[in-house]
Amino acid sequence: MGKTPALVRAPGRVNLIGEHIDYCGLSVLPMAIQRNVRIVFHPRTDRDVLLVNRDPGFGPSTFTLSETIPPAPAGDWGNYARAAAQALVPRFPDLRGIDAQVESDLPIAAGLSSSSALVVAMALAILHANDVSVAPLELMDLLARGERYVGTAGGGMDQSIILGAQAGCASRIDFHPLRLTPTAVPADWQFIVAWSMVHAEKSGAARQEYNERPRQADEARRLVAARLGHPEDTSYPALLAAAPAPELLEIAGQSLPVVLSRRFRHVVTEAVRVHQAEAAMARGDLAVFGQLLDDSHQSLRDDYEVSHAELDHLVELAREAGAAGARLTGAGFGGSIVALCLAERAPQVLTALRERFYAPRGAAADVERYAFTAAPSPGAEVLTPGASPG
Ligand code: GLA
């Protein structure tokens, strides 16, 4: 193991479709984007992890690799590094620490998984510094469970795509067992990401709201399973295999309290949309993919109630400017939208968002940080030792 610093890069992701259903064990369709968390690190001989952040808004953070790593106060960025370390320690009890300098060009709390990118980058840095490796699928699973350290009951989408994405492709992620299946994004399609300027801190205020959704989706699942005479632990994929979606929706509509029935309707219709969207992408059908994005947004807004007025407004503006479809992406409650358009129309959509959304909010000067075209990018990697962050 050399003492020269090494560099790890972990991308953010944009989920194209399949929102709030990964924790139900249902397939999702995200892609990694060209913005990254980068960590320059070198190994230490003791078990300490010393973190500094190039962003002065985030102070230094230090902890020791031990069996139980105590969390920093809720909301502290260092908890994502601790989450990665805590996930690895039981598997590798003798890990040594690292000195690490973190930087990122990913907007934070924008629904683009800057937090999971940090978890993945930290894990790869610690593993590399210790000359150990974990098979990618195992690491995805370990880190998905590990990130719950911060108190969010998230699914496994983010860590999986950040580690397993392929350049030029979106990936359908299936769970139980975990599997990634890439589909090439057509060359004349352009996804655009635009931040609503509303922070959605998964570890902050949005956490309680976020965590309520898996609970409700699960309760709805149990009630429908019971109604069908299936065991209580019948999963969503098993329910969807047992009965056609319209039948499941009818049962839910007749027997569930109204809120649970709406949550259930989102989960089931979104699961169907993921497969339709994957097929539309494979055959280059922009209009159908766009319509599915619109339907997904409506379902997230009305049935799952995770949207925000600013997200709804951005979605509306993107469509008016010529996008084939748009929807909120990520956990919601703020964060970003993703819009799809023909590549040649992207400048026109971005200009419209600048003039009609960012300028009236006094943010026209920052528009390139907030709204940008998203290139389907490769997953995380450790780069050549000695490289410096660029
Ligand atoms: C967050 C979670 C993911 C997923 C999305 C919503 O990003 O980390 O696992 O549940 O929200 O689709």
Image: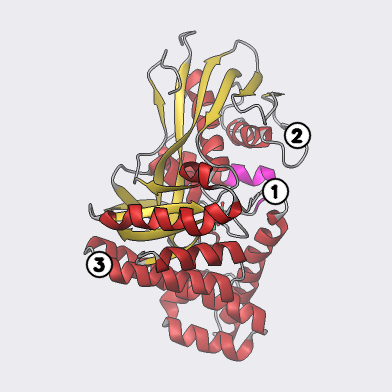
Q: Which of the two discs, 2 and 1, labels the residue nearer the N terminus?
A: 2
Rendering colour mode: secondary structure
Task: Name the quadrant where ligand 1 sits.
Answer: bottom right
Q: Amino acid at mark 2?
A: Ala
Q: Is residue 147 magenta?
A: yes
Quick check: marks 2 and 1 in contact, CB under 8 Å?
A: no
Q: Tag 3's secondary structure? A: loop
Q: Which residues are magenta?
A: 145-152
Q: Amino acid at mark 1?
A: Gly
**Is residue 29 in view?**
no
Image-based side of 79 in relation to 231, left or right: right
The answer as to whether callout 2 falls within 8 Å of ligand 1 is: no
Q: State the separation of the CA atoms marked 3 and 2.
A: 47 Å
Q: Residue at x 30, y 49 (%)?
A: 169
Please name the residue shown 35% across and 42% down the image.
Answer: 377
Which residue is label 3 attached to?
285
Residue nearest the observer in this picture, 49 or 300: 300
Q: Which residue is mark 2?
A: 72
